[in-house]
Image (cartoon, coloured by chain):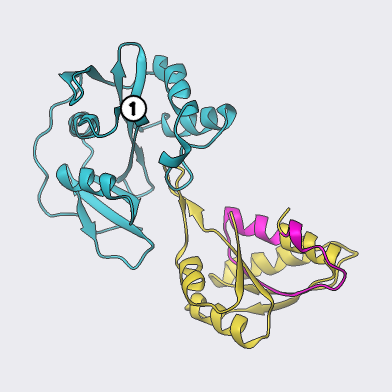
Amino acid sequence: MLFAAARQSTGMKVLLGLAESEFGYRALEETLERAAEAGDDLTVAVYGSADERAGLLDAVRTRRSPEGPEPDVVELEEPAGPALVELADTGDFDRLVIAGGYRSPMGKIQLGEVAEFVLTNAQTSITLVR
Amino acid sequence: MIDSYPDEPAGDFDAPPVEFDDDAGRTIEIRASEESDFDALVEMYDDFDPADRAQGIPPVRENRIRDWLETITTGDALGVVAWHGDAAVGHAILVPDEEGAYELAIFVTQDYQGARIGTKMLEALFGLAQDRGVERVWLTVERWNDPAIRLYHNVGFEDVDSESFEVEMTIRL
């Protein structure tokens, strides 16, 4: 469970930075689940190529729980790291959720460029899903 | 992806098998890894000190270790195993990426670290790799992992300029 300690009656204002990756879809599922349970006000910011963004928007629609609130959706301009940080810091979010990147051929977990930028630069509290 | 490699090859390396006495006086044999090594490697990784894990590998728990080992020992991957008697005490692996280069990783069990086994394994692995026509090898390592960084520099790896959290290095064989 992603936010096991954070079960509360009023939800948080959460921003999910979502890209096409193994960990991205997990971040989406966990964040949607938590939003439905806790009543989070969720915004999903998708980034990547136009094709990838279209696929991600589709995934947000189809994976959303019918009981949960409908998330706001934003498409980020490149470079996505700074765009995500700006959105998180100016949008009054309680928490920014990002996925941890990808696995190398060896199976090493590598943070992507965006995850690294966000971790070092955002003022918002961050949850890293991997 | 990493695409900056030294212009010149790092030199010639002898292929395994290699036998030597390590700095603690133990006789260590390094051999090219074979399918029959699988269970000995599972045992080695199952006992692996969690503090020596790097970037999520080796995974914990035997079933996940088996899955991981299968993916890094199939196809064009190559590896060497360091043996002390019947026990696998080190494993160095090259796994192909999508651009014809190879990612390197090396693991030495805790009691056998700091005894030159890592250097000998990398040299043997490079010898094996040269026999198979491998030319470009890369790795990532955490910035604080000084013993590993020293080892990689000693065998000829060069740092790649990068703003990443991790140090990236390459070598040409």
Pointer 1: residues within 10 angstroms few (<14), some, or many (20+)? few
The residue that appears at 44% across and 67% down in the rendered structure is A113
| Residue A62 visible in the picture | no
| Percent coordinates x, y for residue B168 in the rendering | 30, 56
Q: Which chain is cyan?
A: B
Q: Is residue A109 left or right of residue A70?
A: left
Residue B155 is drawn in which quadrant?
top left
Q: Is residue B63 left or right of residue B4?
A: right
| Percent coordinates x, y for residue A82 in the rendering | 49, 80
Start-end of magenta stretch: A3-28
The residue that appears at 52% across and 30% down in the rendered structure is B65
Q: Is residue B124 left or right of residue A50?
A: left
Q: Is residue B33 above or below residue A20?
A: above
Return the residue at label 1.
B111
Q: Which chain is yellow?
A: A
Which one is in front, A106 or A125? A125
Residue A123 is drawn in which quadrant?
bottom right
Type of amino acid at the residue the image marks with label 1: Asp
State the residue lying farthest toward the right.
A67
Q: Is residue A66 magenta?
A: no
| SS at circle 1 | helix
The residue that appears at 27% across and 50% down in the rendered structure is B146
State the residue lying farthest toward the bottom.
A90
Q: Is residue B126 above or below residue B37?
A: below
Residue A42 is drawn in which quadrant?
bottom right
| Percent coordinates x, y for residue A26 in the rendering | 66, 55
Which one is in front, B131 or A12? A12
Q: Pick the quarter of the image with the C terminus of chain B.
A: top left
Which one is in front, A72 or B89? B89
| Residue B55 visible in the picture | yes
Q: Is residue A27 magenta?
A: yes
